[in-house]
Image (tube, rainbow, N blue to C red):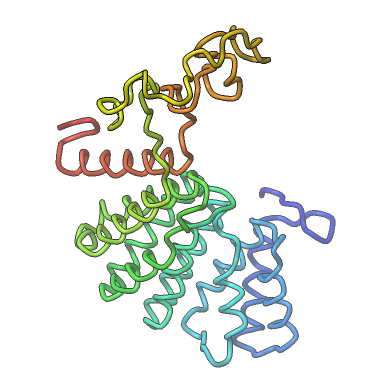
Amino acid sequence: EAEYPWPEGGARSMGSLAADSDALLHAAMVDGDALEYANLVGRLSNPRINPTEARQLLGAFAKRASVCREDLHADLLTAALHVRWVEDAGVAEAYAVLAQELIARSTAFVEPFIASIVDSFASSSQPLPDDVADVAHALLRSVLFTCPLGVRTLCELIHARFPHRRLQTAVHTHYLRHVLRVMSYEPYVQPILVPHIIQQLLAIDAEANVPAALPPPSQQPSALDDEVDDDDQVFRMDDMHDGWPPLPGGGGGGNGAPGLWPAVAGGQPPGGGGAAAMDPEVEKLDALLALVFDFWSRMFGGGAGAG
């Protein structure tokens, strides 16, 4: 049997751990042992719980889901719902089995488990590993198959969990990628979610600052050009830069004096057509639009890049 490191030291076999987990769940939930119940809740609530231990405890809990009562085991349910399943595929699979058992027993568990899945899509700490994401989407499909009315709850939660428009691009693309994946296997949510996606894109677009390159001042037309003669000018500006020395970072002096604008890209004066840095909000919007266009292309165009 495979060995795994026991948190308190030493080693326990996988079979021994499974037997201990079963015995602990039986004593806590069937026999009503208060001390063992508190021990069980504490172990599941530990944020540093070993993945192997978490998997065994969740599996043993799933076997006894039929005796679970919300009034008697509220603390245990809360601890199980908040187990860190998003970092390990094995824990995620055990979590999915527990969710299916509890939801089959009562639809009251639909919303908490859907919320847990959507929260994993919206996590700003780290993206879901691919194998964990596959388990999460399989669980979501199973929940919606068992309880079709959960679609409304799902759409409301997705709308509520959309990342704030000013969060980093990676957070937005991670969330939208999973939302689009949900839309791919549950197409009847598309009429509900598409307006939410558009609303999010418009909110980001409103924050974006798209720079518009202006032509050099000499090329900008003026309403005064046809009305003012050289003879009527009070101050002549043509020769004001003649003889000025170049400034650091620029070219030579003289009329036009490109050296007067060292801080502007390309040594150009403001409005001189120099390249400007891309606004982060514009880059974010471009990344999200690329995901949306790729989704519709694959859904209706027969493959990525089609159409």
Residue at position x 43%, y 54% in the image:
135
Residue 20 at x, y percent in the picture: 69, 69
On screen, residue 224 versus residue 238, left or right, reads left
- The front one of 130 and 157 is 157
Give the quadrant of the C terminus.
top left
Q: Residue furthest right?
A: 9
Please determine whether, in this image, residue 73 is positioned above or below residue 96: below
In which quarter of the view is residue 290 placed?
top left
Residue 121 at x, y percent in the picture: 46, 56
On screen, residue 242 versus residue 233, left or right, reads right
- The front one of 261 and 58 is 261
Please determine whether, in this image, residue 237 is positioned above or below residue 283: above
On screen, residue 11 versus residue 85, left or right, reads right
Residue 97 at x, y percent in the picture: 46, 65
Residue at position x 36%, y 39% in the image:
286
- The front one of 31 and 221 is 221
Please determine whether, in this image, residue 68 is positioned above or below residue 215: below
